[in-house]
Image (cartoon, coloured by chain):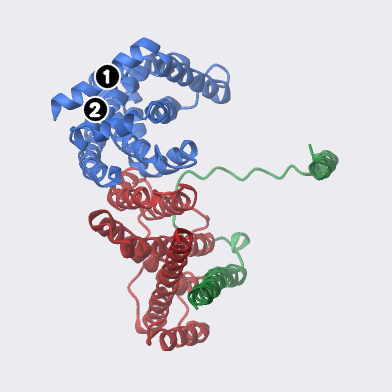
Chain colours: A blue, B green, C red
Amino acid sequence: MIRVAWLILRKDLTVEVRSKEIVYTTLFFAVSCVLVFAFALVREGRGPEDGAAGILWIAVMFAGNLALGRTFERERQSETLRALLLAPASRPAVYVGKLLGILVLLFGAELLLIPLVALLFQARLLAHPFWLVAIMATGTVGFAAVGTLFAAMLVRARSRDVLLPVLLYPITVPVIIAGVRGTATLLQPELDGGIIRFWLALLVTFDVVFVTLALWTFEAVMTD
Amino acid sequence: MTKMLKRWCAVVLLMILSGAASGAAQQPTSQPAQPTQQNEFIPIDQLPPQEQLPAAPLLIGAYVFVLAVLFVYVFSVARRLTNVQRELDRLDTTIKQGRA
Amino acid sequence: MPKWFTPVAFICAAMFAFSPLVIANADYESTMGLVQKIFYYHMPSAWMFLIAAMVCGVASIRYLVTGDLRHDRTALAAGELLVVFGLLTLVTGPLWARKAWGTFWIWDARTTASLVSWMIGCAYLILRRYGGPGSEKLAAALALFGMANVPFIYISVNYWRTIHPATSVVPKLPFTMGFPLWFCVITFVLLFIVLMKLRVRLEEQQTRVDALYLAMDER
């Protein structure tokens, strides 16, 4: 199964490297998003207290939403999703492959967003890099796990563009709470290890539960 | 654009303009005092007299809302059920006539 | 309609009509006074909201596993009731809170979890209505995810807002207040059963109509 997932990931990356469409559009969107927040919230050269954490996560979620939609739109247009499902590959492997592709894209976006937000909102996000990476990684995995499933489910549905955020955001509320609160704790002058560990534990649990659920449901939902 | 659509657009524009005009006219008088921001929850036993709300409107409002929503929902389901039943009967007679 | 339907519906309607009398005769609560009486409709609504969520979740799982459309119909009916009772809870609650706590809304674990669950219920109905053909399975997956989410929301909001005092919404009840509460609970339970039956029946009839149309087209 890992081989299949890796193959799918490689396929997605190859297609993407050739056109770079999703990468450029997602990154540019994420940057514009942060800029809009900067114009809206920065007053007298300072952003709102602790605003940086929230803005970072909102930008990630919006960009992720867009990326998910675009990735599966591409699959839909070339009917490759059906081909993937018809291929003798186990369904969970297809899901994991798509998930890894989305994760690569989102991690890339975060690499760009974190310094940008830290700069524009004068937030010391990079003070504790290890914890930051842990929180961002687990949170992004949680968001992408649910998002990949829903985006794949919605490929053949009507109104799929607007339905994805309608379905995704309520379900990923714990991710945003834990992610933002965890990142905000990192911005405090004194690092409180207990709080960080709690949010991290919550995110890890969320990831485990929902990746498992998604693997099980993918099978049931993608069969016609 | 059809004539009907043009007329609707004109009506909507007129409404927006008149709303904006009346809003502008009211501007000087509509600046209420900002309530103080409440960040914390401080439980007390008795509210100070000037803040005590009359309870009756809230109570009556709540019950009326509950009954209204339930009534609307039951009504909607019953109406759809009658429609579907009528449709079924109509189809049944059509099929019977088709067979006869 | 099964034989028990009309008598149960009748009893439910009668109890509903009678409930204001029962509630009015209950004792006043010492600190909250008159407005506490919203509790007698708010609490049963909240419980029915929860029950509807569980029924929807379980029916969705059964539908995903077996593919039997009966479970799908049950899930849809329960989803609608989830939104209806959730709406009742989320409106009567703040109306009560305005007088009892001084503010319409607080971000604590229970209220936030209820709001998010209600929104997931609304998303479920939106998906079923506008998702086009084949949205039953997607909606079932959504319901399943929503159900799995509730503990996470609870824990995360609890930790997020621990600065707020934990106001217990259900104090220990003496009999004079216990009786109206249970009266209303039974009323709401009967209402829930009646509404579920009605709504499932509507779906069944609609399915039969669609099947008949299809059969006629094929001739």
Vertical placement of residue A135 versus C111, above or below: above
Circle 1 sits on which residue?
A11
The correct choice, above or below, for C38 with respect to A174 in the image is below
Please state the chain letter of the residue tagged with numbered disc 1 in the rendered image. Answer: A
The x, y position of residue A104, in whole percent, is 29, 20
Q: Using the image, determine if residue B77 lies above or below residue A218.
A: below
At a point 42% along the width and 62% down the height, the residue shown is C82
Q: Secondary structure at mark 1?
A: helix
The numbered dot on residue B85 is: none
Of callouts 1 and 2, the N-terminal one? 1
* Quadrant position of residue A71: top left
- Residue A97 visible, this angle: yes
Mark 1 crowdedness (10 Å alpha carbons): few <14, some 14-19, many ≥20? some
> Farthest residue toward the top?
A18
Residue C151 horizontal/vertical position (percent) = 28, 51
CB under 8 Å between discs 1 and 2: yes
Measured from the top left, where is residue A120 in percent x and y? 47, 15
**What is the chain identity of the residue bearing mark 2?**
A
Nearer the observer, disc 1 or disc 2? 1
Residue for badge 2: A97
Q: Report the residue at 58% width, 18% height from top.
A: A44
Please give left or right for residue A142 compared with residue A76 in the image. Answer: left
Position of the C terminus of chain C by quadrant: bottom left
